[in-house]
Amino acid sequence: MSKADQEIASLREQVLARGELPRHIAIIMDGNGRWAKRRGLPRVAGHNEGINSVREITRECGQIGIKVLTLYTFSIENWSRPKSEVTYLMTLLLRTIRNEVNELHKNNVRLTLMGHLADLPDDPLKGLLEGVEKTSLNTGLNLNLALSYGGRAEILDATRTIAQNVREGRIALEDIDERLFSSYLYTRDIPDPDLLIRTSGELRISNFLLWQMAYAELYVTETLWPDFRNKELLLAISEYQKRERRFGKTSEQITHSPGI
C-alpha cells in the first residue's frame, strides 16, 4: 500500500470511528472548465476527468455508509452554455450511465433523478431512466442526480401544485406548513442535506436545493472538481464531524438534549 493510500485508509478509519456521519451529502461539482484551462486543454477534457471524480466519490460514499449523495449534474441555467458544450455534456451523460450502471447495480447503489427531466434529449433521458429502473430495488447508497435542475423552479413547481390542490379542495389552506410543503418537493422521499460541498472555491449555492439547505453545513474547498477524490471527501466529512449543529438552539440545549 502506498503512503497516499495509507493516509486515506487512516483518514477513513478516523471518520468512521467518530460516527455522526452525514446522512445526505450534496455536492456542487464546480471547476471542470478551469481545470482544463490550466492545462491548456479544451473544456470537455475537464468534464471527462470530472467523471472519474464522480465514480470515486460515489464508491467512497457507498463504502463508508452515506445514505444519499446528490450531485448537481446540470442546472437549468447550463442550457445557456455554448451549444457544442451542451451537446457534448449530454453525450457524456449517456455514455457515462451506460458504462457505469452495471457497477452501480453490483455495488447496491440506487440511482434516482430530479429536475425538469423532460428538457433532456430523448437518448440521454432513456438511458438514465433505464438506469433508474435497473437499480430501483437496491438498498445501499442513493445516488441522486440533479438534471436540468433549479431551486427556484422546484419551489415554483411545488407552489403551483399546492395552489391547484387547494383550489380543487384536496387540501385546506390552513393545512399548509413546512412538512406539507416539503412533501411537494423533488426531494420528498429523501432527508434534507446535512452537508453541502462546493468545489473550486466559489462562495455561492447557485440555485441549488434552496429550501432543503436551511440547516445544511457548508464546506467550500479550493480544489477543482476533477481533483476532488476520496481524500478530499473524507476531509470534508471530518470537518463536518467537528461542528456543532444547533438548529436554532443553544449549545447547552444541544448538550442536554437526547437528539434533534
Image (spheres, rainbow, N blue to C red):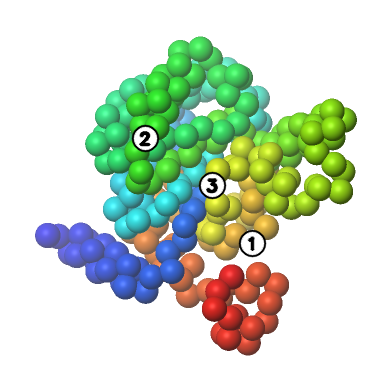
Viewer-nearest residue: 166 or 111: 166
How far apart are the two marked residues, 1 and 3, measured between alpha carbons?
15 Å
- For disc 2, the marked residue is 137
Label 2 element class: loop
Q: Is residue 31 above or below residue 98?
A: below
Camera-nearest residue between 23 and 161: 161
> Which residue is disc 1 drawn over?
215
User: Which kind of residue does numbered mark 3 sit on?
Assistant: Ile
x 61%, y 37%: residue: 186
Labelled disc at residue 190: 3
Task: Give the mark nearer the N terminus: 1 vs 2.
Answer: 2
Give the percent coordinates (x, y) of residue 183.
66, 43
Q: Residue at x 45, y 48 (%)?
A: 68
Q: Position of residue 196 (x, y in %)?
A: 54, 55
Mark 2 surroundings: few (<14), some (14-19) or many (≥20) residues within 10 A: few
Q: Say if mark 3 contacts mark 2, CB within 8 Å.
A: no
Q: Is residue 194 above or below residue 108?
A: below
Earlier sequence position, callout 3 versus callout 2 = 2
The mark closer to the camera, 1 or 2, is 2
What kind of element bears circle 1? helix
From this viewpoint, which residue is outermost toward the left? Answer: 1
Horizontal arrangement in the rendering, residue 253 relative to residue 28 (left or right): right
